[in-house]
Image (cartoon, rainbow, N blue to C red):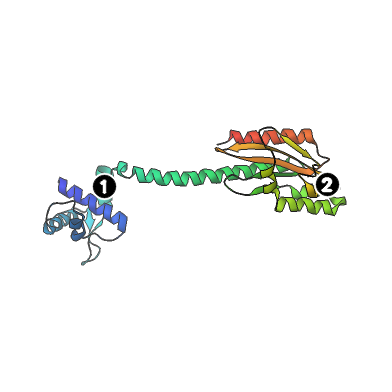
Amino acid sequence: MNTRQSRLLMAIIDEFINTALPVGSKQIVEQGHFDVSGATIRNEMQILSEEGFIEQPHISAGRIPTAKGYRMYVREFMQPSLQERAVRRRFTVLKDQYLRQKDQERVYEAVALLAKMMCNVAFATVPHKDHVYYLGLANALKQPEFREDPALASGIVEILETPLADLLSRIPIDETVRYYIGDEDILANIHSCSMIVKRYRVGGEEGCVGILGPIRMDYGYNTVALELVSELLKSER
């Protein structure tokens, strides 16, 4: 195979990869990569066909690569560096999406872990989303305070389902555990409850993770649990 034939095979394969349509000599000439006539291109295509590198699927159609042609292309002619910029650009977009999704999954899993450690509600804001994820409400509502006071139970449900994200955006939250114990200005509807909360970081993003339950909660136990879960989030990735 001479140089022109190898260049022609590359051009045919590249065009077929892009279009999935048989490639004719006219297309090759119009691309301007060969300073020869259409007749010369047709002669070279005939030689490539006879050698088994391309084939003509229909009498009136152009040529398409054969498996032998692809093998030659990959082994001898392919230049990945020409596609590297496009590949890296696409990879960067998909990698960012992948990492954001993994960050969110880690937060969900951390909240699930925290909820399994206690009979209170565990919650966290979700990276890249204006959303608060929480678990453990069913167990929390089994606490005596909630069983005896339906209004208190409905209040905690209301704050979880609607204003919790807004509430968290208005209160000081940092790397230390903060305690809001029966604060009527913070937990107006549920002043018989307490909330403990701290900041977490994951994948360059930050949010808050916390525990909501009756004012009669085990603060020492919950504080350690909250610290451990926030450290777990920070240590991953």
Whether residue 114 is visible: yes
Q: Residue furthest bottom?
A: 60
Disc 2 marks a residue whose amino acid type is Gln
In the image, 22: left or right of 130? left
- Say which residue label 2 marks: 143
Q: Write the residue at 16% across / 45% down.
A: 3
Q: Write the residue at 88% across / 51% down.
A: 148
Q: Write the residue at 11% across / 59% down.
A: 39
Image coordinates for residue 138, horizontal then vertical, percent: 76, 50
Disc 1 marks a residue whose amino acid type is Tyr
Q: Nearer the viewer, residue 24 or 188?
A: 188
Image coordinates for residue 74, horizontal then vertical, percent: 28, 45
Which corner quadrant holds the C terminus? top right
Image coordinates for residue 154, horizontal then vertical, percent: 79, 54
Q: Along the polypeptide, which appears first: circle 1 or circle 2?
A: 1
Whole-Å distance between the Cαs marked 1 and 2?
70 Å
- Say which residue label 1 marks: 73
Q: Residue furthest right?
A: 148
